[in-house]
Image: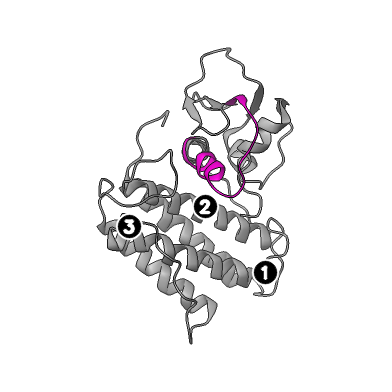
Amino acid sequence: MVQTGWTAQRWTAVFIEQAEMFRKAVADADPAAEVPTRPGWTVQDLVVHLARFLETSTAYLRTGSRNPMSPPSPPVGLSPLEYLDLQLTAAGEILTAVPGNRPVWTFSPAAPDLAWVWHRRIAHETVLRRFDAQATVRQIVATESDLCVDGIDEVLTTIVAAKLDGDVPTMATGTAVVRPTDVPESWLISLVEGEVPEVRAAAPGEEGDAQVTGEAELVYFWLWNRMNLTEMTGDQRVLDVLRVGRGH
């Protein structure tokens, strides 16, 4: 991580704030409405996805499992919103109760097996789904730059490695500099086929095989395939590796 100041408690506060905005947006939306940022998804799909994600991810925090677990079975007898409300409440309680340094299985070869990785992932997943829901009802609110910086850092230091470790390996080798224009933080990510990416702070004026610049909020949502970004140059194969939100 290239910046400090984030803790399990702070990510939990983000989750609670973002979950409240998500819940309001989906309550205002037609369950059958299409989600413009997720082609093929309806609002109901979005609701079920977040509820299922929360149930799956908080299970690691709740049980302390050191091994990957199978996703839970779909709920029986609950409406999508009832399922969501149940999981939002449970997640708030579990995130608050579990310390960030608790050993637990995590999803990325670049991440430590500690609970704070899940606190962070749950916070940012909820940010993304809040964005999707608000886009549907055309009421998107701005995302604070320090939260976007942490989200960029999560993608580059954790999510890209998980993506490459999964079912979408890449042949791309090279470097990228990600340098938002409105915050001091910057990153250089080095890709080598078959290896976990290396990430460090980019030096002033340093360039890579690809460059990404723009306001932190735009860069954050570009990485998750939610916004277009014109300020990109260099190796397209490297840029494609950085965008982790396709199909997510």
Q: Which residue is pictured at 62% across the width and 57% down the height?
A: 132
Q: Position of residue 64 (x, y in %)?
A: 28, 58
Residue marked by disc 3: 95
**Dividing the image into 4 quarters, which one contains the N terminus?**
top left
- CB-based contact (under 8 Å), mark 2 and mark 3: no
Q: Which of marks 1 and 3 is nearer the N terminus?
A: 1
Amino acid type at image mark 3: Leu
Q: Residue 42 carries which label?
A: 1
Range of residues picked out in magenta: 157-180
Q: Distance between the Cα atoms at labels 2 and 1?
A: 18 Å
- Residue 244 sits above or below residue 214 on the image: below
Q: Position of residue 16 (x, y in %)?
A: 41, 58
User: Would you say 155 lies left or right of 245 here?
Assistant: left
Q: Distance between the Cα atoms at labels 1 and 3?
A: 28 Å
- Residue 213 sits above or below residue 22 on the image: above
Question: Which residue is the extreme one toward the front?
Answer: 194
Q: Position of residue 66 (x, y in %)?
A: 31, 54
Q: Disc 2 on helix, strand or loop? A: helix
Amino acid type at image mark 2: Val
- Residue 130 sits above or below residue 169 on the image: below
Crowd class of label 2 (few under 14; some 14 to 19; many from 20; radius 10 Å): many
Question: Which residue is the extreme one toward the bottom?
Answer: 77
Q: Position of residue 138 (x, y in %)?
A: 68, 58
Q: Which residue is pictured at 55% across the width and 45% down the height?
A: 163
Determine the image quadrant of residue 180.
top right
- Residue 100 sits above or below residue 46 on the image: above
Which one is closest to the eye, mark 2 or mark 1?
1
Q: Which of marks 2 and 3 is nearer the N terminus?
A: 3
Amino acid type at image mark 1: Thr
Residue marked by disc 2: 127
